[in-house]
Structures are given as structure tokens and as C-alpha cells.
Amino acid sequence: MKRFLVAVDLQKDFVDGALGTNEAQAIVPNAVKKIKSFDGKIFVTFDTHSENYLSTAEGKKLPVTHCVKGTDGWQLNANIQKALDGKDYISVEKPTFGLVDLPGLIEKEANGEEFEIELIGLCTDICVVSNALLLKANFPEAPIAVDSSCCAGVTPQAHKSALDTMKSCQIDIL
């Protein structure tokens, strides 16, 4: 069985930049360990915005400029990038919470074989849950899991609520 890890938005702006939190910083060592020990293909998503972010629908509801392509905050956290060095991974930019192309990318990599998916990353209650539910909708029979020790939400309560939602939707919470 093929294994896929989806590392969601482990970028500087979400760890210790514009939208960083202590909880996000705290999960980096766990995410590094997970990435280093993972045996399979890794998909790394990049939340990607342009300079006009504040005039977008998202920017109007979350008026904090972040993850503008090419800026320092758009880059992966240095420890995450170091963990990925030498690993088999695909970087994918996403302009919104869920990466609608992700199921197709995974299906292509699976090449007809059975597979399982695990997700880690930031933020649990926005982009992780969006991608987990998108994958579950596309692959209802595939084992899909989220490692809660490698995720952080906007707040600890939002993190817990998102984990509860995913669990209700038959996504395994590790």
C-alpha cells in the first residue's frame, strides 16, 4: 500500500510570523520527526497569496497580510525545510484553504494502487480540516488520518473542535 503525507502550510508566517502562535511553534519538532521518519511520498502545500491579498474575499475576513509569494513569510519554516531535504516530496501552491487539485495529484501518484493518507500542519481549524474533508470526500474508502501532535489551530479550542469535526467525518485522529 502506498503512503502519502500531506504537510499543510508549515510556513514561516503560520509558525512564527504574521499569524504565528506559540502552539504552532510547539508542534514543529513533532512535524520534523514525522517528516524525517515518513516512508512515502510527501505533498507540501504552500498557502500562496499576492500583494492584493487584503482586497480578496479571504483578506476582507482575515485582514492580516500573510504568505505573499516570494516573501520570507511564504517560505517553509527552516526546520521543516531541513527535514524535507533528501525526501521525496512535491511542493504545491494553494490560493485558498483547500487544495482542489490535491485528490488528482494523489490519484496520479497512487497509479492505481491502494493508498493511505496522513495530514499534518497548520492551521488545524482552517487548512488542515479543509484538505482532510476534501480528501475524505474524494477517497471515502481510503484510510485518512491526522496526527494531532503535528497540528495547531488558531486557538487550542479551535484545534480541538476541528479534530472533533474530522473524527465525526471518519478521519482517524492520531
Image: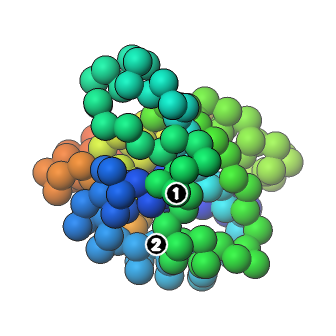
Residue type of the residue flagged with mark 2? Ala
Q: Is 127 placed above or below 9 here?
A: above
Whether pointer 2 and pointer 1 mark residues with C-beta atoms closer than 8 Å, the reply is: no
Quick check: 36 left or right of 47?
right
- State how far apart marks 2 and 1 are (Cα): 20 Å
* Residue at position x 52%, y 57% in the image: 72
Quick check: 142 left or right of 24?
right
Q: Could you tell me which secondary element the residue under label 1 belongs to? A: helix
Q: Which numbered marker is on residue 72? A: 1
Q: Is 165 placed above or below 15 here?
A: above
Which residue matches tag 2?
Answer: 31
Q: Residue furthest left?
A: 157
Which numbered disc flags the more N-terminal residue, 2 or 1? 2
Report crowding for label 1: few under 14, some 14 to 19, many 20 or more residues within 10 A (C-alpha).
some
| Residue 1 position in % (x across, y down) | 73, 63
Q: Residue furthest right?
A: 111
Quick check: 116 left or right of 122?
right
Between 1 and 126, the one lying in front of the other is 126
